Structure formats: C-alpha cells, structure tokens
Amino acid sequence: MEVEELTATMGKYYGARIVTAIVGIETDVNKVETVASQIVRYQNVEDIFVVTGDYDIILKVRFPDYEEFQNFLVHDLGRIDGIKRTRTMMVLTIKKEMGQKIGE
C-alpha cells in the first residue's frame, strides 16, 4: 500500500476523531536518554517510558487527527538523531485508562 493510499484510508477511518497510539522506539544504545529528553518537548506525547526488551522507549501519544499524528511520526521523530526504528500500534478501543474503566 502506497503512503498516500494509507494516509487517505487512515484519514477516513479516524476522520475528526482523536488518534491515540503506542509507539515503540529503538535507539542507538548510547543515545536512549538523549532521545527521550528530546521527545519530552512534544505536547501530544502523554507518556514516555525508558524500558528494557524489544524497544528502548515506549510512547503513548494522542493527536486531534491522523494527519497531525502522521506529521509527528514522519517529521518530528524523523529529525531526532539516534532513533533507529519505530513501531506504531494504533489504539482501536480504550477499556481502561489512568485507572478508570471506560464505557461501562
């Protein structure tokens, strides 16, 4: 699927709905703290966790629409030196957040 086609499809799906996602970031081993400290400045990043395992950093992000989210992934994270790879998991449904059950 081409980037333009994916953007159009995701834009249609999310429309004007808020986009919530979890982003796993793999960094150069000696740049984890530097990368995390740069990401802190982005308003739409709600949580940043430096972790062990497959990723070095896990983000929880929330954007007003898919286009702003895409811009963050491509342009903002793309400018940060030390990021080797990212994996994005789009949230479909939130069942519990900040200790509170949602929708029950």
Image (cartoon, rainbow, N blue to C red):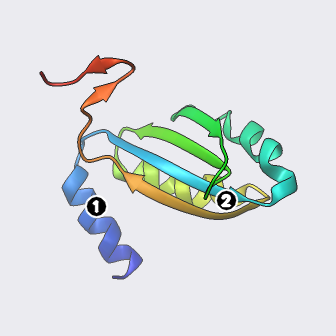
* Quadrant housing residue 18: top left
Q: In the image shown, does 98 or 44 lie closer to the viewer? A: 98
Q: Position of residue 77 (x, y in %)?
A: 64, 54
* Residue 85 in the image: above or below residue 22: below
Please give the label number shown on residue 10: 1
The earlier-in-sequence mark between 2 and 1 is 1
Residue farthest left in this picture:
104
Residue that carries the numbered disc 2 in the rendered image: 26
Q: Is residue 72 visible?
A: no
The residue that appears at 79% across and 59% down in the rendered structure is 82
Q: Position of residue 97 (x, y in %)?
A: 34, 25
Q: In the image shown, does 13 or 52 lie closer to the viewer? A: 52
Residue farthest bottom in this picture:
1
Is 92 displayed left or right of 21 in the figure?
A: left
SS at circle 2: strand
SS at circle 1: helix
Residue type for callout 2: Glu
Q: CA distance from mark 2 to mark 1?
A: 24 Å
Is 85 displayed left or right of 67 in the figure?
A: right
Crowding at mark 2 (Cα within 10 Å: few <14, some 14-19, many 20+): some
Residue type for callout 1: Met
The residue that appears at 80% across and 42% down in the rendered structure is 33
Q: Position of residue 9 (x, y in %)?
A: 24, 66
Crowding at mark 1 (Cα within 10 Å: few <14, some 14-19, many 20+): some
Please give the label number shown on residue 75: none
